Image (cartoon, helix red, strand yellow):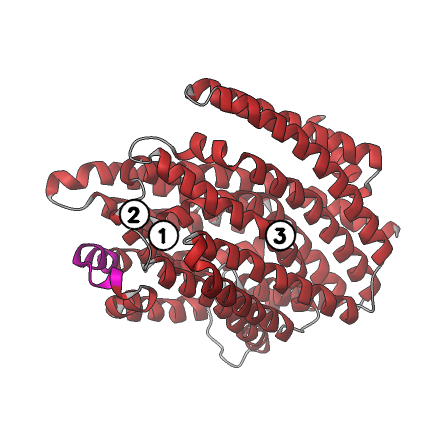
Amino acid sequence: MKKAASDTTTIVRSASAVSAAVMCSRVLGLVREQAFAYLFGAGPAFDAFVVAFRIPNLLRDLFGEGALSTAFVTVFSDCQENRDAEHTWRLAGNVIVFFSLLVGLICLVGIWQSDNLVRLLVEKKFEIDPGRMGLAVSLTRIMFPFLLFVSLASVVMGILNSRGYFFIPALASSFFNFGSISVGVALALIFPAYGLPAIAGMAFGTLVGGFLQLAGQIPSLYRSGFRFIPNLNLGDPGLKRVLRLMLPAVVGLSALQLNVFINNFFASSLVVGSLSWLNYAFRIFQFPVGVFGVALAIAATPVMARHAARKDIAALRETYTSSLLMSLALSIPATVGLLVLSEPVVRVIFQYGRFDAVSARMTAAALDCFVVGLFAYAAVKVTVPVFYALDETRYPVVGSFIAVAINLLVVLTTIGTLAHRAMALGISLGMVGNFLFLLVVVYHRLGGFSRCYLFAGLVKILTAATGMGLVAAVGLRLITLWEGSRVVEISVLSGVIVAATVTYGMFLHLLGLKEFDIVVTRVRARLAGG
């Protein structure tokens, strides 16, 4: 248990750094979405951008920040534990060269076939609109090279995480958002004077942001001791293992991206603005997922990979249980808070310029449906690395297809009554099903874990979240009194969020959740300069 407590402290320390960086990135990401909302609202231009960006972003999830990153961290960590430095850096160079060539080729094919790729993602109603369709194809061609930059950035992030560097890799998305905002907005304001669509400026900004996401990590990479040994050896066992781990992960992520395809297809058949409402809601939803779920997963993955490399299943079991409980302790209150305060949150973030009150209500309705599955999103982020560490990647694949089946069923049965909300609810319930399946499997693969400990912790979290929800509900009544004054509304909303968060923390402290006490101790040490 001492070892588990030490691992938990290590994960909390790393996750706190990652969370701070991810929070900065997510805040800038929301600023980026605010720029879109202000300049374009929820109209046809932004609908076209959503479709266009979905294609390289989908492939990024498959080859970059999803499958490649997790597979590479697993193999690289194992190599560091059991091989010499020369072999480790040769593996890194081989992976970099191989994926540069592979993803570069994919980008060229994607640019060539952009019109056909867009047609795959949209329903006939979208396709016969020449303005939206033509614009979506042009934007896709502009943004496709973004995939190459973020794929290489993902490999660099994996190296840095394995070497104990977490803050800068997590901050890399901030470089992306900064580039997207500064360059994108500047070009969006300039382009119309030259007869070019303003939204194309945001597409070029996205491309520059992707480059900065890679370039911003390079100084830290060399400080970590990295040596670039360029080589291309297709027979290298390390590269083969990365590809072998990636293959089922790509299949699994393909299943999740099939959900995106399904939702894009059905949403494109609804009223103009549906794609935009879903996108804006998803961006808010991604804030807590990134700050909590992704941060914990990034911090826990190298620790669990080392335990697996040492064949220490007991330590792996304890680390996973503690990480899962921490993810629930952070995601469940976020779920409650967003369910209660979704409308004022959306108004405060987006309701400016061309983004009107109707768009705010529609976005908030989608957000309510997304956050139903927030805890499952965060929990899956922590659970999947266990299967990578154990070389059991087929189970996440099965879980992903379960998510697809549930999503499709929900969309088909509820789209007539819920409209765009059906897509958000389908994604959330699909992820809940995915998590429950993975939880059962990981329980058996690890030889069990303390159900009583997990259940007792969950009861404490739910109790504290209920108290927090009551405070937020009372605060909502106060916010509605000041709905017409934006400055006062922002101030009251901020006060309500602080009060609800303090209430939740007090409850958890009184109930004695160990993981919460570790987080508090780490925060106090950080504030004291420790």
Q: Residue at x 49, y 77 (%)?
A: 233
Residue placed under numbered mark 2 in the picture:
46
Residue positioned 52% across, 58% down in the render: 427
Q: Earlier in the sequence, mark 3 or mark 2?
A: 2
Q: In the image shown, does 60 or 217 lie closer to the viewer?
A: 60
Q: Which residues are magenta?
A: 125-138
Indicate the quadrant where residue 495 lies.
top right
Say whether marks 1 and 2 touch (CB < 8 Å). yes
Numbered disc 3: secondary structure: helix
The tag on residue 52 is none
* Amino acid at pointer 3: Ala
Disc 1, SS: helix
Q: From the viewer's perspective, tell me whether residue 68 is left or right of residue 469.
A: left
Q: Is residue 224 visible?
A: no
Q: Give the Cα distance between marks 3 and 1.
A: 24 Å
The residue sitting at the right extreme is 1
Counting residues from the N terminus, which is met first, the one under dot 1 or under dot 2?
Answer: 2
In this rendering, is residue 153 above or below 460? Answer: below
The residue that disc 3 covers is: 378
Q: Which residue is mark 1?
A: 275
Q: Quadrant of residue 187?
A: top left
Q: Is residue 481 left or right of residue 453?
A: left
For mark 2, does the 10 Å Cα neighbourhood hold few (<14), some (14 to 19), or many (20 or more) residues? Answer: many
- Alpha carbon distance from label 3 to label 2: 28 Å
Mark 1: which amino acid? Leu
Compute the Cα span from label 1 to label 2.
Answer: 8 Å
Relative vertical location of residue 62 with respect to residue 279 in this rendering, above or below:
below
Label 1: few (<14), some (14–19) or many (≥20) C-alpha neighbours in 10 Å: many
Q: Main secondary structure of the magenta part?
A: helix
* Quarter occupied by residue 139: bottom left
The percent coordinates of residue 92 (x first, y second) are 54, 65
First in residue order: circle 3 vs circle 1: 1
